[in-house]
Amino acid sequence: MNPLDWWLLLAVLLFCIGAFGVLARRNTILVIMSLELMLNAVNIALVAVAQFRAGSAGAGVLFSLFVITVAAAEVTVGLGIVIANYRAKRTVQADRFDEMKG
Amino acid sequence: MPGGDFHPFFFVVIAAWILICGLGVVLFRKIVYSAVSMVFCFLGVAMAYALLNAELVAIIQILVYVGAISVVILFAIMLTEVQGDQFTLFFNRQTVFAAPVAVATCVILAVMLVSSEMTGVGEASLNLSVRELSELLFNRYVFPFELVSLVLLGAMIGAIVLARGEGEKR
């Protein structure tokens, strides 16, 4: 395995930790935090590939900056939704948001 | 060597840091502990960028994630945390399904990674300076740059509208 493979393996592990958090936890704030872990894992993979491969011409680095920006926007909107839900239901647990259950 | 000299010692230390803090985020029962663990995980990711010779991304990671996003999440926790909520049990029936799915995804991706043969790895990649990166950003990638500014504006307005609530007229 060359160094790039090790970096990508780190990204895979972090991504799966985040995926576990998204699937297993019920606190919606914690789901958003796990989502951030997954985005960070993708960023590590982008930057690693960009730094190890010739001819990427800064695209990986710039794309990771765009991912960071969109993640910031996603966190603000997500937490806005969480707080609005908390006002309505006095809880942040995902399994209590069951108004649309058939 | 492209991507910085590969220091196995530093890589192992930073990888262990990131993974332990990441596990802390999903495994801690108290959400404030998870948030603090997340801050340290983001710091570890910034160190990983620095080890990869991507200084600009490392600095922006610290500014945006460690500085801004962590504070926003801590504020949300302070605004919403319910003391003594009985639903904070960690091992629930979702864990039974989530753990195998996460482990299977991990194994599949790792096997794909090891068995694939990427070409062009290890050739001399041009390590761009901040000046060259900004020239790229404002020439070739100026359209996504403007698009991202629109996304941020929309997110800002949306977050204010959502968090202010409909009933309150001020």
Image (cartoon, helix red, strand yellow):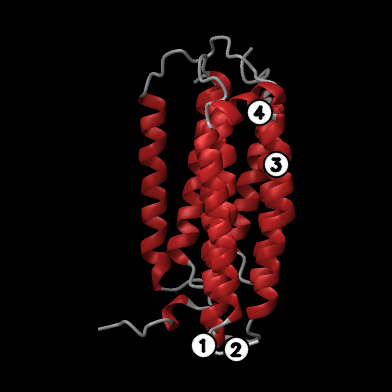
Chain of residue at mark 4: B
Distance from Cα at disc 3 to Cα at disc 4: 14 Å
Where does the N terminus of chain B fall, quadrant-wise? Answer: top right
Dot 4 amino acid type:
Ser
Assess whether mark 4 and mark 1 are in contact (beta carbons under 8 angstroms): no
| Camera-side residue of A55 and B11 | A55
Residue at 45% x, 54% y is: A19
Residue at 55% x, 19% y is: A57
Q: Are marks 2 and 1 on the same chain?
A: no
Distance from Cα at disc 3 to Cα at disc 2: 36 Å
Distance from Cα at disc 1 to Cα at disc 4: 45 Å
Q: Give the SS element for disc 4.
A: helix
Q: Are marks 3 and 4 on the same chain?
A: yes
Q: Are marks 3 and 2 on the same chain?
A: yes
Find disc 1 in the rendering and name its residue: A88
The answer to whether any part of residue A7 appears in the image is no
